[in-house]
Amino acid sequence: MRDFHNYIVWQRGHQFALDVYKQTKSFPKEELFGMTSQLRRASTSIPINIAEGCGRRSDAEFAHFLNIAAGSASEVEEELRLSFDLGFLKESDTIKLEKEVKEIKAMLGKLIETLHL
């Protein structure tokens, strides 16, 4: 079994989810069960799936959960763009969060490649 705490991609994903929570505190109250919830759920799915994959026994299972994390990262990208277009996020915050999630996706892709499946 792997210790997810040792993976930089998990560390970055964890911090990213915390950053998303901070940014979504200012979203309109009527979005609490809409975009706020959706963006928070998808962002937390990234480190959660990395951690769950680390608890699996095979490289194939680990890769499966890394792929789910990557899918969640893609979902977050779109939700960030929607949040900006709806006026919920400032451009500078959107750019910073988009840059971070793209880097996390790239790290996940490289980690998946190292598993040689």
Image (spheres, rainbow, N blue to C red):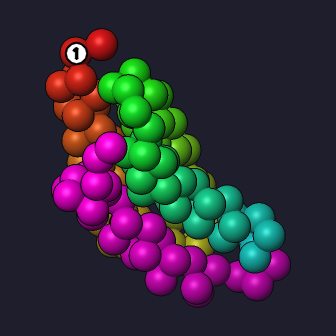
Residue ranking furthest to the top: 117
Q: How many marks?
A: 1
**On screen, 47 above or below 96?**
above
In the image, 48: left or right of 54? right
Is residue 77 visible in the rendered image? The answer is: no
State the residue at coordinates (59%, 66%): 40
In magenta segment, residue 12:
yes
Q: Nearer the viewer, residue 117 or 46?
A: 117
Q: Which residue is mark 1?
A: 116
Q: What percent of the width, then of the height, locates residue 106?
A: 25, 38
Amino acid under disc 1: His
In which image quadrant can residue 17 be found? bottom left
State the residue at coordinates (47%, 83%): 22
Q: Nearer the viewer, residue 62 or 40?
A: 62
**On screen, 116 above or below 112?**
above
Is residue 113 visible in the rendered image? The answer is: yes
Q: What percent of the width, then of the height, locates residue 39?
A: 59, 61
* Quarter of the figure that contains the C terminus: top left
State the residue at coordinates (28%, 28%): 112
In magenta segment, residue 94:
no
What kind of secondary structure does the magenta stretch mostly adopt? helix
Q: Please state the extent of the stretch shown in magenta in the rendering.
A: 1-30
State the residue at coordinates (20%, 58%): 6
Q: Nearer the viewer, residue 72 or 79?
A: 72
* Quarter of the figure that contains the N terminus: top left
Q: Nearer the viewer, residue 20 or 98?
A: 20
In the image, 54: left or right of 115? right
**On screen, 93 above or below 58?**
below
Q: What percent of the width, then of the height, locates residue 29?
A: 76, 84
In which image quadrant can residue 53 be found? top left
Considering the numbered disc 1 on the image, is that residue within a helix, a strand or a loop? loop
